[in-house]
Image: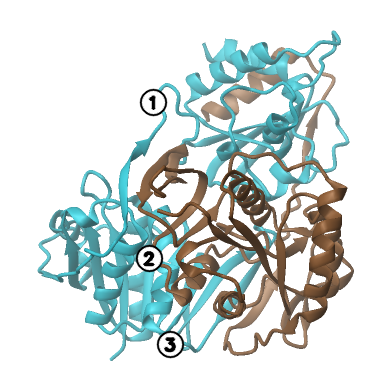
Chain colours: A cyan, B brown
């Protein structure tokens, strides 16, 4: 009987991330649909609590643990994943597309002599075989794909399935992995404080700021200081996540006035992210980037724009408010208290 | 420790982001409608990697930069006319499809074989650069596989900054979730670095650099070997552009208060 291996890594607190629980749901359904065994591998500093939290999935558990596996490093994560995959002779490997696994698991396909497909948006079984879905050309088109090569390593983006629920007591087979030859050491994290944090992947709302915030306003002057105050007030009140159009981020490289807390990491669209949020509100955006590519996974979309005929907003959002974003957002902040 | 690097940047071309893309069935699987006619640009993240490579080479004398590109050479030639004016590099070309629908493994294999064939490359000094994803396939998997195939197992993805230590060590800042960075130190080359946007703006055009580049790179384009990407069983049951046209309600010529009130009610719903 073939084996579907579910791989997970622990978070700093020893738990499994929501996206890892979603990937388990997908892996379990895949194993059932294929008539395959389900195996689960957990990597981290300490893995028993994480394994217990999903013991109800009915998998045979493998673990690679210890201080060498607490931090996300390509070489040690890959060595651990390789040991687990070989221990259970995995035909299919399913994991969530976290930054940690997105870094390491493509290499697993080479180590196993298999293939990899990443950032899946869907995974199902047809006629006993896995069928994957993923986006191409920056979320512009979705492909449904199959392949014969095995092992097949698959990573799933967040939101593809419900999170698995089913704790219990897991009997974890511990595997020893030698990583003494790894030349990289993780020295720390650089995280924004809670007050400074403006990228919030779990927030309900994405607020996208466009280049209009840094352009001359009706009085002929630029008011970046006012823009910063209005945007920050809104972020602090709503605890939403902040995104930016490419043009606004690029202004920093062109010597224009910039909003101080915006970086390339805020960018949504072609060379940015396509985050998943229940609602999206764009302001001063006039292009395809935020309205099509960056908003692919935003359910309810509204926009504030001075141009009623903006082709990128019309047809892409549910409601288009035609007006001055400075004035409207100031008033929104007032109402929000 | 040596700080003269042999930097190989993997990067190809993608359709200009402003183009409307439509999938069609081609003889070898899905393709883009009028793909060869679409204006192309250097993949944006690969571009960032190239500019970071050029900057690093400038600051560490003795370093060299190669741009290894898998793509149709006629299109590559067009794009290189402009890219060549941005930074000095030696072009190495594999003549094949740059389609996003090509298997990432096949792409990685061609790139690894092509890099293996660079005569002057010292792999002990190798920094393998590329974008952490492409704007075509967007798998974020090719660089890792190229690294594995070349035996380079110190790898980083989502890189925005590297700092070279006096001992030749490399401090790397990688993007992780939630707008945070992970900082790591690798003791020396070789290493794989998949770049996010980096910290450098796009360099202005420099016609002199362009002339110097194209003198070397035009022959490289002519020497390009055909790339065989046919070894995959990957097949597509469908590729579709989602029909997501929404019925947009336009709210205009109403007081700011009314708009704001409606937005707040929506936010609180």
Q: Which residue is mark 3?
A: A128
SS category of the residue bearing label 3 = loop
- Vertical placement of residue A109 versus A162, above or below: below
Q: Position of residue A195 (x, y in %)?
A: 42, 21
Q: Are marks 3 and 1 in contact (CB under 8 Å)?
A: no
Across and down, in percent, residue A33 comes to 38, 81
Badge 1 marks a residue whose secondary structure is loop
| Measured Cα–Cα span from mark 3 to mark 1 | 48 Å
Say above or below: A148 vs A93. below
Callout 2: SS: strand
Give the crowd class for mark 3: few <14, some 14-19, many >=20 residues within 10 Å. Answer: some
Side of B89 where A92 appears, left or right: left
Q: Are marks 1 and 2 in contact (CB under 8 Å)?
A: no
Task: Give me the chain letter of mark 3.
Answer: A
> Cα distance, mark 1 to mark 2?
29 Å
Q: Is residue B175 left or right of residue B36?
A: left
* Place of residue B141 in the rendered image (x, y in percent of width and height, measured from the top left): 51, 67
> Which mark is nearer the camera, 3 or 2?
2
Which is nearer the N-term, disc 3 or disc 1? 3
- Pointers 1 and 2 within a single chain: yes
Of residue A15 and residue B180, the one placed in the foreground of this image is B180
Q: In the rendered image, which quarter is residue B82 located in?
A: bottom right
Label 1: chain letter: A
- Whether the residues at callouts 3 and 2 have beta carbons within 8 Å, the answer is no
B190 on left or right of A318: left
Mark found first going from the N terminus, 3 or 2: 2
- Residue at numbered disc 2: A95
Image disc number at residue A193:
1
């Amino acid at each position: 009987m073939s084996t579907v291996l579910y791989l997970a890594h622990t978070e700093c607190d020893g738990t499994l991330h929501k996206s890892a629980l979603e990937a388990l749901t997908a892996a379990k359904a895949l194993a059932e649909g294929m008539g395959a065994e389900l195996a689960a591998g957990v990597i981290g500093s300490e893995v028993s609590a994480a394994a217990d939290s999903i013991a109800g999935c009915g998998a045979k558990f493998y673990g690679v643990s210890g201080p060498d596996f607490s931090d996300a490093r390509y070489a040690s994560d890959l060595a651990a994943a390789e040991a687990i995959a070989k221990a259970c002779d995995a035909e299919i490997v399913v994991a969530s597309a976290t930054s940690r696994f997105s870094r390491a698991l493509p290499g697993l396909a080479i180590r196993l002599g298999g293939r990899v497909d990443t950032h899946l948006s869907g995974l199902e079984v047809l006629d006993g075989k896995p069928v994957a879905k993923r986006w191409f050309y920056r979320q512009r088109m979705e492909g449904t794909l199959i392949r014969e090569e095995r092992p097949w390593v698959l990573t799933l983006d967040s939101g593809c399935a419900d999170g698995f629920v089913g704790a219990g007591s897991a009997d974890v087979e511990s595997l020893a992995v030698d990583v003494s030859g790894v030349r990289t050491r993780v020295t720390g994290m650089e995280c924004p404080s809670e007050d400074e944090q403006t990228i919030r992947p779990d927030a309900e709302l994405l607020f996208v700021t466009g280049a209009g915030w840094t352009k001359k306003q009706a009085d002929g002057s630029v008011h970046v200081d006012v823009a910063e105050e209005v945007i920050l007030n809104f972020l602090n009140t709503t605890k939403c996540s902040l995104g930016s159009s490419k043009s606004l981020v690029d202004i920093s490289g062109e010597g224009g006035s910039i909003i101080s807390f915006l970086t390339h990491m805020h960018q949504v669209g072609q060379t940015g992210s396509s985050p998943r949020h229940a609602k999206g509100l764009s302001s001063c955006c006039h292009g395809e980037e935020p309205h099509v590519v960056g908003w692919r996974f935003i359910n309810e979309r509204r926009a504030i724009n001075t141009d009623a005929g903006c082709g990128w907003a019309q047809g892409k959002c549910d409601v288009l408010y035609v007006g001055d974003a400075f004035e409207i957002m100031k008033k929104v902040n007032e109402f929000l208290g | 420790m040596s700080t003269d690097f042999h930097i190989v940047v993997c990067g190809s071309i993608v359709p200009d982001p402003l183009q409307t893309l439509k999938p069609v069935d081609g003889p070898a699987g899905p393709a883009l409608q009028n793909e060869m006619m679409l204006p192309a640009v250097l993949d944006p993240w690969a571009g960032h990697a190239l500019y970071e490579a050029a900057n690093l080479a400038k600051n560490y004398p003795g370093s060299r930069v190669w741009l290894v590109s898998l793509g149709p050479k006629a299109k590559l030639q067009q794009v290189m006319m402009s890219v060549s004016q941005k930074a000095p590099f030696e072009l190495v070309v594999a003549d094949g499809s740059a389609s996003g629908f090509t298997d990432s493994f096949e792409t990685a294999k061609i790139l690894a074989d092509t890099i293996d064939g660079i005569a002057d490359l010292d792999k002990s000094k190798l920094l393998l650069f590329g974008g952490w994803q492409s704007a075509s396939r967007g798998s974020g998997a090719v660089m890792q596989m190229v690294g594995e195939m070349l035996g380079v197992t110190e790898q980083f993805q989502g890189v925005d900054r590297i700092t070279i230590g006096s001992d030749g060590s490399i401090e790397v800042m990688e993007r992780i979730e939630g707008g945070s960075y992970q900082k790591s130190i690798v003791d020396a080359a070789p290493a794989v670095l998949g770049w996010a946007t980096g910290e450098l703006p796009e360099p202005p055009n420099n016609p002199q650099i362009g002339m110097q580049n194209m003198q070397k790179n035009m022959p490289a384009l002519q020497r390009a070997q055909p790339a065989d990407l046919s070894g995959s069983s990957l097949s597509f049951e469908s590729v579709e552009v989602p029909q997501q046209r929404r019925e947009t309600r336009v709210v205009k010529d109403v007081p700011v208060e009314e708009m704001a009130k409606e937005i707040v009610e929506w936010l609180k719903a």
